[in-house]
């Protein structure tokens, strides 16, 4: 069975490979700090297997995270400006291959969806081939590998490890911000465990007009929007605002439909995703991939959608959920 641990080990191998490439780059302005950062991160993916199995202490991972933060905070990372091709070369490739360049990109979602749909029948005897608890994640990893193979077959680069070289270039152009989604989602769990939702509920209910459904809906949606901007992750903001306003006020006090309240609430939170650099995988990665002069250009383009959409989601919740 291909389980989720195999996916984590594959990711760990990639990070270690990038660290080795950085360490071997004599022209890199911060090669040892950068190599240490990405290499340590890669080792964490391996060590996490034993932590999950209960055979290794988790506090070591905590120390590793603090070391990663220290390396980033002391500016030990830098963009090595690795070059895999020049601008004119990429333009020539684009003109040569045309729309065929989209085939690898489309391969990833197609393979992922097909594997997820076929997962129930992909068995050997009674053992499923894909981890049934993490089918989507395993299928996504297989789709990514398949997309890389298809890209190699279509583009036929001079070196078979070109995907590793190119991904290193993109990773370094993003920098430590590539880890923000993972760290911020963890922060959301910590905030919930620490009772931040309860504290927010006490603070908000003290100033919110009592008996006002409209005020409660606005506070919930705007709160999700703001917390998502601050934390960079709608899934991290959701438990905090739901514990504070969503469940005790909108569902229990005003008897709102939980499915509608929480579904539209998540959409209101995602409006904040459009506005924050903390959501690095959505807003900074595209800027790096497109080599935009303004790394916040994606956010600037999305602001005109985010605020009207927040208003629409707030109105939909008010009129549909109660």
Image: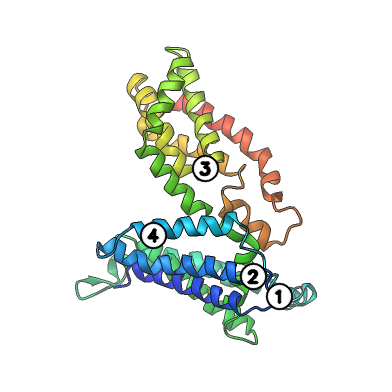
**Circle 2 SS class:** helix
Q: Position of residue 253 (x, y in %)?
A: 35, 19
**Would residue 317 be visible to someone looking at this image?**
yes
How far apart are the two marked residues, 2 and 3, measured between alpha carbons? 26 Å
- Rendered image: mark on residue 61: 4
Q: Which mark is residue 6?
A: none
The mark that comes first in sequence, 3 or 1, is: 1
Secondary structure under tag 1 reads loop
Quadrant of image for the C terminus:
top left
Residue at the far left: name it: 126
Mark 2 vs 1: CB contact within 8 A: yes
Which residue position holds label 3?
231
**Quadrant of the snapshot with the N terminus:** bottom left
Distance in Å between CA atoms under marks 4 and 1? 33 Å
Q: CA distance from mark 2 to mark 1?
A: 7 Å
Q: Is residue 47 left or right of residue 311?
A: left
Compared to 13, does 263 lie above or below?
Answer: above
Dot 4 alpha-carbon crowd within 10 angstroms: few under 14, some 14 to 19, many 20 or more: some
If you read the primary sequence from the N terminus, does the residue marked by circle 4 or circle 2 appear first?
4
Could you tell me if the residues under marks 3 and 1 are in contact, i.e. CB atoms within 8 Å? no
Q: How far apart are the two marked residues, 4 and 2, measured between alpha carbons?
A: 27 Å
Crowdedness of circle 1 by 10 Å Cα count: few (<14), some, many (20+)?
few
């Amino acid at each position: 069975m291909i389980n989720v641990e195999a996916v984590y080990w594959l990711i760990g191998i990639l990070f270690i490979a990038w660290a080795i490439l950085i360490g071997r780059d004599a022209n890199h302005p911060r090669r040892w700090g950068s190599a240490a950062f990405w290499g340590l991160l890669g080792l964490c993916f391996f060590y996490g297997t034993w932590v999950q199995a209960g055979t290794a202490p988790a506090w070591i991972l905590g120390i590793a995270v603090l070391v990663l933060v220290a390396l980033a905070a002391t500016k030990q990372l830098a963009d090595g400006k690795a070059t895999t091709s020049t601008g004119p070369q990429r333009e020539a490739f684009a003109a040569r291959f045309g729309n065929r360049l989209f085939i690898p990109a489309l391969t990833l979602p197609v393979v992922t969806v097909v594997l997820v749909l076929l997962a129930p029948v992909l068995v050997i005897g009674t053992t499923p081939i894909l981890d049934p608890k993490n089918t989507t994640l395993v299928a996504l990893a297989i789709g990514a590998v398949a997309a890389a193979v298809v890209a190699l077959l279509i583009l036929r680069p001079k070196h078979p490890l070109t995907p590793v070289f190119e991904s290193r270039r993109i990773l370094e152009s993003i920098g430590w911000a590539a880890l923000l989604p993972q760290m911020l989602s963890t922060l959301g769990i910590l905030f919930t465990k620490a009772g931040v939702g309860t504290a927010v509920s006490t603070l908000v209910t003290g100033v919110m007009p009592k008996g006002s459904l409209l005020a409660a809906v606005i506070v919930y949606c705007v709160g999700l929007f703001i917390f998502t901007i601050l934390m960079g992750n709608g899934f991290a903001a959701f438990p905090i605002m739901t514990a504070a306003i969503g469940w005790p006020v909108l569902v229990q006090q005003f008897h709102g439909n939980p499915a509608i309240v929480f579904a539209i609430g998540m959409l209101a939170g995602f409006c904040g995703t459009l506005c924050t650099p903390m959501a690095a995988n959505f807003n900074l990665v595209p800027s790096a991939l497109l080599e935009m002069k303004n790394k916040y250009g994606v956010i600037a383009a999305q602001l005109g959608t985010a605020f009207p959409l927040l208003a629409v989601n707030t109105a939909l919740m008010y009129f549909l959920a109660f």
